[in-house]
Image: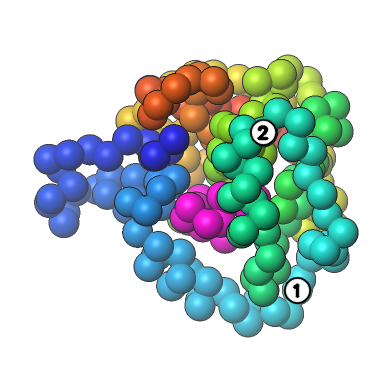
Amino acid sequence: MRNLFQKIRSPLTNPGFTGLLLVATICLSSAFDSRSVHAASDQTADNISAQTLDFDLESYTPDQSLWSEKTKVKYEKAKFTEEPPLALLTIERLNLEAPIYLGTDRVTLDRGLGHVNGTARPGEVGNIALSGHRDSFFRSLKDIKKGDTIEMQTPDGIENFEVSDISIVDALDISVIDPTDTTVLTLITCHPFYYVGYAPDRYIVRATPVGN
């Protein structure tokens, strides 16, 4: 699974191409421009250090029953980090619990879910976009249903979301990370889940806050 949204070949050579930054922020491989993540991390370092999530990484063990053997090895190599997670995402029915980190570079997605740079952060109003690997943390999304509850824990508390829409889009469709006036949670992974090679589509789960 090389890219969340496949590279657009010719337009990427044009610095003025408006979709460049959006595509660059959500690549799932070394093609991702990690400099934008480091810049965002530097800009928010004070905020992160002031408000950290109550999360014990040493005692955390994700459910790996659906994971590929390769991703299990990658997780063991990447799981320890000094960077505190932004939030914790839980879907109890799917036995999914995963820390959310800033950015979507390869190592980040080996250790957890990645917050798509440029979208609303967990706890903020807007489109909160999260990406994850289809052969590890987000493989269980194949069994998600409308109406399922998604819990998001941030340093400020817990917010519950209800799944409102599930769709499959083309790999080049970046409209799923467009800004929204209201709070929306967008989960993104590659599709099909067991496809051999670079998956051609993206699996999108949209959820809205419970009570809204």
Label 2 or label 1, whichever lies nearer to me, is: 2
Q: Are marks 2 and 1 in contact (CB under 8 Å)?
A: no
The residue tagged 2 is 67
- Label 2, residues with CA under 10 Å away: few <14, some 14-19, many ≥20: some
- Circle 2 — which element? loop
Image point 76% across, 71% down: which residue? Answer: 52
Image point 47% across, 55% down: which residue? Answer: 105
Q: Is residue 135 magenta?
A: no
Please tell me whether residue 119 is drawn above or below residue 71 in the rendered image.
Answer: below
Image point 18% across, 47% down: which residue? Answer: 12
The quadrant of the picture occupied by the N terminus is top left
The residue tagged 1 is 51
Query: In which quadrant of the rendered view does residue 7 lie?
Result: top left
**Residue 39 seen:** yes
Q: Which residues are magenta?
A: 101-117
Residue 33 is situated, as x and y percent measured from the top left of the image, at: 35, 59
Query: In which quadrant of the rendered view does residue 9 lie?
Result: top left
Residue 16 image label: none
Q: CA distance from mark 2 to mark 1?
A: 32 Å
Kind of residue indicated by mark 1: Gln
Drawn side of residue 186 relative to residue 151, left or right: left
- Circle 1 — which element? loop
Residue 72 is situated, as x and y percent measured from the top left of the image, at: 65, 43
Image point 12% across, 40% down: which residue? Answer: 10
**Residue 125 seen:** no
Query: Closest to the observer: 9 or 157?
Result: 9
Please tell me whether residue 208 is drawn above or below residue 71 in the rendered image.
Answer: above
